[in-house]
Image (cartoon, rainbow, N blue to C red):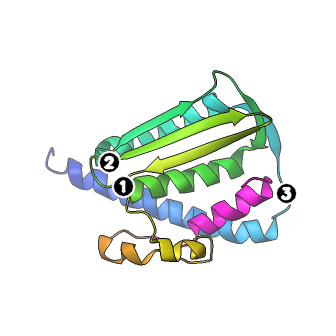
Amino acid sequence: AEQALPHINMALKNVNTLLQLTTNLINFERIDVYSSTLYVSEYELNTYMNDVCATFRKYAEMKHVRFVYESNFDYLSVWFDSDKMGSILKNILSNALKYTPEDGSVCIYASEEGNSWSIEVKDTGIGIPTCEQKKLFRNYFRGSNVVNLKVTGSGIGLMLVYKLVKLHKGK
């Protein structure tokens, strides 16, 4: 039974990957149809981010990736569409973890400056070749450097992120 645990964990990871891909496809199609609809509410950003980050901690531990969230404020009240913001963050964080090798790191930093706030994600993953970065937010784009990694992907996650960020008037 103990020998089966790694296989069960891998199967669960693959199920979650398929679920994420399916959700991305559905959301990608939906964003074109409902692109102007935002259901905005007020959230405390550290609380929201800690909840989102908690869903990725176990995966980061399994990959032996350092996973950190920090901010330059104690409390910040912000307005956004929680479902869409969740899709943005889940796509970015899952990509960061997916393409960061063992013993790497993924650091999320929220900051407030003047009347604006931002969320920045830095990782020690493989990145995207400089010459391909202009294609980053196109449909079905995947960097040429992922071909040999045996990492699956659809190439629509970052396009979805781009559309959802624009919908929130972000950049």
Which segment is the magenta one? 153-171
Disc 2 residue crowd, few under 14, some 14–19, many 20+, Cα 10 Å: some
- What residue does disc 1 label? 100
Q: Is residue 109 above or below residue 97?
A: above
Identify the element where label 2 is drawn. Answer: loop
Q: Is residue 8 one of those drawn in magenta?
A: no
- What residue does disc 3 label? 37
* Residue shown at the point (33%, 44%) measured from the top left: 65
In percent of width and height, residue 132 lies at 51, 76
Q: CA distance from mark 3 to mark 2?
A: 38 Å
Q: Are marks 2 and 1 in contact (CB under 8 Å)?
A: yes
In percent of width and height, residue 6 lies at 22, 51
Disc 3 residue crowd, few under 14, some 14–19, many 20+, Cα 10 Å: few
Q: Amino acid at mark 3?
A: Thr
In percent of width and height, residue 79 lies at 79, 38
Q: Amino acid at mark 2?
A: Gly
Residue 52 seen in the current view: no
In percent of width and height, residue 36 lies at 86, 61
Q: Amino acid at mark 1?
A: Thr
Pick whichever, 110 or 37, lies toward us: 110
Disc 1 residue crowd, few under 14, some 14–19, many 20+, Cα 10 Å: many
- What residue does disc 2 label? 104
